[in-house]
Amino acid sequence: MRLEPGAAAAVAPLFSPPARGVGDLSDLATTIEAEDSFDLAACRTSITARTLIVAGDRARFYGSALVAETAHLIPNSTVRLFRRRGNVTVTSGRRFAATVSGFLTVDRRPGS
């Protein structure tokens, strides 16, 4: 799918308040197109790195079924689903920061 010029600006009001004031949304539109056309199940090899999947239970664009499928396709993944959060608001607040920090600082040495 290719967005028409100005289409990203037209959908800006649909985003949460933190995302509305970002100005030119063409990079966001390009990112969304890339995400929507990517099929993890079609990849020849799976992701092997520890992976944190963070989502909100009120996400409009990537729902819980897609989160569950993604987790299934990434063997070493951890899912954190935040209540009362959407696609953009999931990254705001202390719970998100603490979750990511904890995931990144966990002791990963063998036997620990």
Image (cartoon, grey):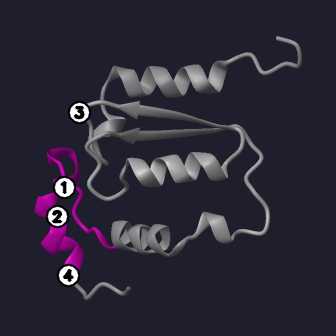
What residue is pinned by disc 3? 84
**Residue 95 location, x and y as percent?**
38, 22
Q: Amino acid at mark 4?
A: Gly
Mark 1 vs mark 3: give the one in front: 3
Q: Are marks 4 and 3 in contact (CB under 8 Å)?
A: no
**The residue stretch that appears in magenta:** 7-26
Sequence-first tag of 4 and 3: 4
Whole-angstrom CA distance, mark 4 to mark 3, is 30 Å
* 3D distance between C-alphas at marks 4 and 2: 10 Å
Decide: few, some or many residues near mark 1? Use Cα within 10 Å; few <14, some 14-19, many ≥20.
some
Residue located at (70% from left, 37% from top) = 50
Query: Is residue 99 in view?
Result: yes
Q: Is residue 17 magenta?
A: yes
| Residue shown at the point (46%, 20%) measured from the top left | 98
- Check if mark 1's residue and mark 4's residue have beta carbons within 8 Å: no
Query: Compared to 9, does 3 lie above or below?
Result: below
Viewer-nearest of labels 4 and 3? 3
- For mark 4, what is the residue? 6
**Residue 82 on image: x %, y %:** 35, 31
Q: Earlier in the sequence, mark 3 or mark 2?
A: 2
**Quick check: can you spot residue 21?**
no
Q: CA distance from mark 3 to mark 2?
A: 21 Å
Q: Which residue is mark 1?
A: 15
